Amino acid sequence: MKNHLVRAVQAVLLGTMTLLGAASCAGTHSGQPFSQDVQDRLNRAVDAKMAEFGVPGAIVGVWVPGKGEWIACKGVADIRTGAAPRVQDRVRIASITKTFAATVILQLADEKRLSLSDTLNQYDLGVTVPNSDRITIRNLLNMTSGLFNYTDDENFWQQFLAAPTAVWTPKRLVEMAAAKGAVSPPGQAYAYNNTNYVLLGMIIEKVTGNTAAAEITRRIIDELGLRNTSFPTTAAMPAPFMHGYMPEAGIGGDTGGPAVIDMSVESPTPFYTAGGMISDLMDLKTWLQALASGSLVSPEMQKERMTFGSPNTPYYGLGVMNGGNMLGHSGEITGYNSSAYTHPGGNGATIIVLINRYPSKVEGVSDQILAEVGKAVADLIQR
């Protein structure tokens, strides 16, 4: 879960990059499939990108109201057994977790239990943070805190990869970032930063007296009936799941090599509210619709969420990425890479790509796949 490049996300989603794909996982279609010609184009697009980046397996879905749908389960979910992915397979969704954490913060703002203008020093989080008297909750949400991103620290990855199932505390993650000092003054520069969302999780716990996992579960997962979505606290993956793989060289090495190290069983605690959650294709589709409609927050907070006005980027709001004509989020964590986007209006197209490889020779392989599938069905969206 290294820095996800929002500009790259925007590049693959703008313009004709609007839709993702259709093949089929047996017995999963509930609507009208795309024509065979479109399905053939989509299959070729996904297969080519999987081969280019050495992706073992992928679960891909696209829904276009009035035009059709496509769901594809490709490659292998388990390289040891050769088992194929299934549509109900769970994956680690990494930074898509941020959309859940941000929603809880916006709900707490609706309840007047906090304000987006509150500064960090108003909350006793048990850790010293640079510029805490000037960093606001809004700065954390829209990535303008100016803090150091702890996942940019090579020492973090060395420690994590040496003991992937070890438990980390949020305080330890923030202390690792704070030791590097401030990178820029609060509010003056956008920089994607996982430290921000760890702090938001700590604020959720301080305000509610409950764990962030419990609040996300009660307020979102249970409310929407997301049966295959969870905020885990242990390293185990709930069955069924698509195994996640990384190359032997690991983070910072020869990431272009084959993905052979199984990272499915890893502690979510080093990623916490910045990237620790688990979900599946259909739950993410349900979640995207709620995210885009603002059904779990007030109109005022939905407007705040959808304000893409950070300095030096128009592509990040309050816990959502802006792809020009789509919104959602992407995520990367050792073993998994996911992209989930939908149209907030218009034709309502929804795209989800889940793959079981990270890292690769480029960041955002799931976005690369999304882009190619988008090209294959752009004519359906433009009509």
Image (cartoon, rainbow, N blue to C red):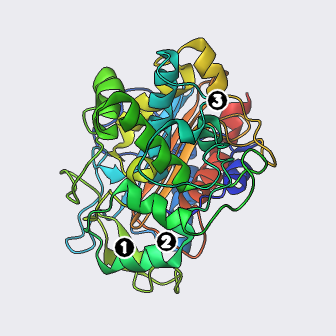
Mark 2 against mark 1, which lies toward the viewer?
1
Question: Which corner quadrant of the image does residue 336 belong to?
Answer: bottom left
Residue shown at the point (35%, 24%) measured from the top left: 219
**Mark carried by residue 160:** 1
Residue 285, compared with residue 156, is above or below; it is above
Q: Is residue 211 visible?
A: yes
Q: Tag 1 or tag 2, which sits nearer the N-term?
A: 1
Q: Tag 2 or tag 3, which sits nearer the N-term?
A: 3
Q: Label 3, label 2: how many angstroms apart (C-alpha)?
A: 36 Å
Residue 269 vs residue 71, the one in the foreground: 269
Mark 3 against mark 2, which lies toward the viewer?
3
x then y, percent, for residue 127: 45, 54
Residue under label 3: 117
At label 1, counting other C-alpha atoms closer than 10 Å, the crowd grade (few under 14, some 14-19, many 20 or more) is: some
Locate the C terminus and report the quarter of the image it occupies. top right
x then y, percent, for residue 34: 51, 36
**Mark carried by residue 359:** 2
Q: Label 2, label 1: how many angstroms apart (C-alpha)?
A: 15 Å
Q: Is residue 107 left or right of residue 10?
A: left
Task: Look at label 1 and name its amino acid.
Answer: Phe
